[in-house]
Amino acid sequence: MTFLEYLQSRRELLLAQTLEHATIVLMSVALATVIGVLVALWTYRNPRTRAVATGIAAAMLTIPSFALLGLLIAPLGLGYTPTLVALTMYALLPILRNTIVGLSEIDPALTEAARGIGMSRLRSLSTVEIPLAWPVILTGIRVSTQMTMGIAAVGAYVGGPGLGNQIFSGLANLGGVNSLNQALVGTVGVIVLALTVDFALALLGKLTRAGHRPKLFRPRPARRPTLTPTTAVPSPSLGGRE
């Protein structure tokens, strides 16, 4: 069976596995984004806590994927949950580090101006600081997405969902019928899916870049002075006095 024939015969299964793969990656990146942004907001003003937070996230990233997934089997079992937890741990560092960098590079004068006009800390974060840091944060999200897209395939080692099942089945039966097709389909599918999601995130960045400056600090167009009508003063008579 050729590669294209294998694609046609397994079309529904491959579509389902592709959807599962994309779903678990996006869920893990979303969780890592929430955790990373919250931790960055809590630590970016304090160099010591900032270093501790990034150090812990970096240490989690250095754990080999097979080892981490194997260690998670005991508390979480097999299947979806250990894969989701492992991917979230791996996706955390780029998002956390980029959020800290983006927030640290904001001009303090902008935040002082926001507080000076009566903004609360929460409103200043939501309308000034996070919008200004968003391009840098999005770059970290894109890096995490690409990285976890490949690691998610290893989740098949613990019964996780996605295209990794095609890769592991092909490698386990290497030399058998359709084993090479299975490995190629899984590998090519992960690559295509990663490029597609990255394109979508790049498009999101372009759509949100127009509002990179908070509305509060955008210069307002100068208004033209309006002429108010005045009462006409009668011209003096050319003749003599009456």
Image (cartoon, rainbow, N blue to C red):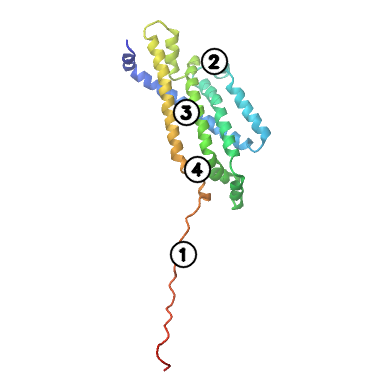
Residue matched to label 1: 225
Residue at the spot 52% in from the left edge and 38% down from the top edge: 134
CA gap, disc 3 and disc 4: 24 Å
Residues tagged 4 and 1 counted as in contact (Cβ below 8 A): no
Residue 46 image point, x, y percent:
67, 36
Q: Secondary structure at mark 3?
A: helix
Q: Nearer the viewer, mark 4 or mark 1?
A: 1
Residue matched to label 2: 66
SS under mark 2: helix
Of residues 181 and 110, the one nearer the viewer is 110
How many numbered marks appear?
Answer: 4
Identify residue type, mark 2.
Answer: Phe
| Neighbours of disc 3 within 10 Å: few (<14), some (14-19), many (20+) | many
Q: Is residue 132 above or below residue 36?
A: below
Disc 4 to disc 1, C-alpha distance: 31 Å
Q: Are marks 3 and 1 in contact (CB under 8 Å)?
A: no
Real-space Cα distance between discs 2 and 4?
40 Å
Of pointers 2 and 3, the one earlier in the residue sequence = 3
* Residue tagged 4: 212
Could you tell me if residue 224 is visible in this image?
A: yes
Nearer the N terminus, badge 2 or badge 4? 2
Distance CA(mark 2)–CA(mark 3): 21 Å
Check disc 4 and give the amino acid type: His
Q: Which quadrant of the figure has residue 56?
A: top right
Residue at 60% over, 34% down: 39
Q: Which mark is residue 26?
A: 3
Q: Earlier in the sequence, mark 3 or mark 1?
A: 3
Q: Amino acid at mark 1?
A: Pro
Which of 31/233 is in front? 233
Instruction: Point out the residue furthest to the right here.
Output: 48
Quadrant in which the C terminus appears? bottom left
